[in-house]
Image (cartoon, rainbow, N blue to C red):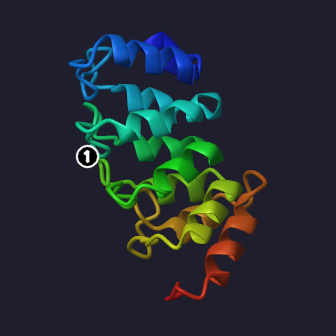
Amino acid sequence: MLAAVENGDVEELAELMRQDPGFRVNMGQDGNGWTLLHYACRENSRSAVIPLLLAHPDINVNLKNQSGHAPCYYAGFYGHTSCVREMLGDSRVKVNEPTNSGSTSLHRAARWGRLDAIKWWIASGREMDLGAPGDIDKTDAIGAARQFIACECGRKEVVLLLLADPRIDPG
């Protein structure tokens, strides 16, 4: 099943799931707690299998791996817009869930200038926890984006986008 997820092959994954109706959708695949949903959220090319996994009755959409990362964290961290859209569309997904170290998907998306992912987040209407002002390393999404403006492109646009959202208090 992992190969079907890594290839983004919905038909193959669906067939394998039909052949094994008792398969454990939340089972770690690698000894580090990475589930099929974790792998699906890691690459845009795999986003097609996300709805199939989310439809499984036993799926735990917020299951964390050993590093404390839920699948949604990887979608935001890597800025995979199709994965972000799928995860934001599922109300069970705790989009602001922190990792074991305290960082969040939005913080990482802002820090790495994942502009399109943040646009989709805003468009979804889902809650955006911008974190504690000044906690640049873990939660302060605007502060993290500002810190890296001089380093690479994309961050300035992220800051402006986040500050333009009427739901956000720029503090």
Q: Mark 1 points at which residue?
A: 100
User: x, y percentage for residue 159?
Assistant: 66, 71
Q: In this view, does 133 lie above or below 55?
A: below
* Quarter of the view holding residue 16: top left
Above or below: residue 63 compared with residue 141: above
Using the rendered image of the protein, determine whether residue 39 is visible from the camera's viewpoint: yes
Q: Nearer the viewer, residue 149 or 23?
A: 23
- Occupied quadrant, residue 155: bottom right
Viewer-closest of 119 and 10:
10
Q: How many labels does the image show?
A: 1
Q: Residue at x 23, y 22 (%)?
A: 24
Question: In the depicted view, which residue is nearer to us: 127 or 13?
Answer: 13
Q: Is residue 14 left or right of residue 100?
A: right
Q: How crowded is mark 1: few (under 14 residues within 10 Å), some or many (20 or more)?
A: few
SS at badge 1: loop
Q: Residue at x 75, y 57 (%)?
A: 154
Horizontal side of residue 35 vs 161, given as left or right = left
The one nearer the camera, 20 or 59, is 20
Quadrant where the N terminus sits is top left
Q: Judge left or right: residue 17 versus residue 43.
A: left
94 vs 133: above or below: above
Residue 76 in view in this figure? no
Is residue 25 left or right of 147 when viewed as pictured? left
Report which quarter residue 69 is drawn in: top left
- Amino acid type assigned to the residue bearing label 1 in the image: Asn
Question: Which residue shows up at 53% across the image and 86% down it?
Answer: 167
Q: Residue 82, position in %: x, y?
A: 63, 45
Query: What is the x, y in percent for residue 104?
Result: 40, 55
Where is residue 53 shown, x and y percent of the image? 40, 34
